[in-house]
Image: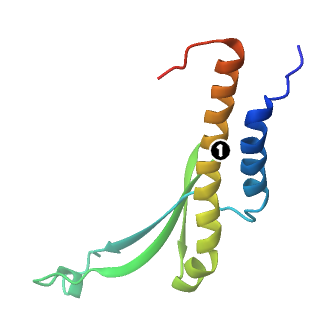
Amino acid sequence: MAATEPPVEALAEFEALAGEIAGLGPALPGTVTERYTRCTSTGCRCRADPPQPHGPYLDWTRKVAGKTVTHRLSREQYERYQPWFDNHRRLRELTHQLEALSLRTVETAEGWPPKT
């Protein structure tokens, strides 16, 4: 059975979401975390009282084929790609909105009670 077109009242929402998704541009998945570390050198400042840990280091972590991959980014790299990380976050938000709208449309079309 072929999919049907969404009702006219939902078309504008679908088109608005699709338009925003199309306009996003590059999107990088994953998380960037600022980390501080301590080494094993006994005389190092990171072992002092109070400790002065090494860092900050910017680690970009993501999943590739089910495995966690981490890259260390320089501050310049982070600033250069920050809009791409923001685009991915927005893409996830828009995808969730698209899914929710699709579910509401199907529930309404089929007369199913909404799931909460």
Q: Nearer the viewer, residue 107 or 49?
A: 107
Q: Is residue 28 above or below residue 66?
A: below
Answer with left or right where residue 54 lies relative to residue 6: left
Q: Nearer the viewer, residue 70 or 29?
A: 29
Q: Is residue 54 visible?
A: yes
> Where is residue 108 drawn, in percent x and y?
66, 20
Q: Quadrant of the N terminus?
A: top right
Q: Is residue 29 visible?
A: no
> Where is residue 57 drawn, in percent x and y?
42, 77
> Where is residue 64 drawn, in percent x and y?
63, 50
Query: Measuring 65% from the left and 53% from the top, which residue is drawn there?
Result: 91
Hey, what amino acid is under mark 1? Thr
Q: Is residue 7 above or below residue 63?
A: above
Instruction: Determine whether the residue tagged by mark 1 lies in a helix, strand or loop.
Output: helix
Answer with left or right where residue 115 lies relative to residue 112: left
Outermost left residue: 49
Query: Measuring 61% from the left and 12% from the top, which residue is drawn there?
Result: 112
What coloring was used for the rendering? rainbow
Query: What residue is pinned by disc 1?
Result: 95
Q: Nearer the viewer, residue 80 or 47?
A: 80
Query: Measuring 18% from the left and 80% from the top, which residue is drawn there?
Result: 47
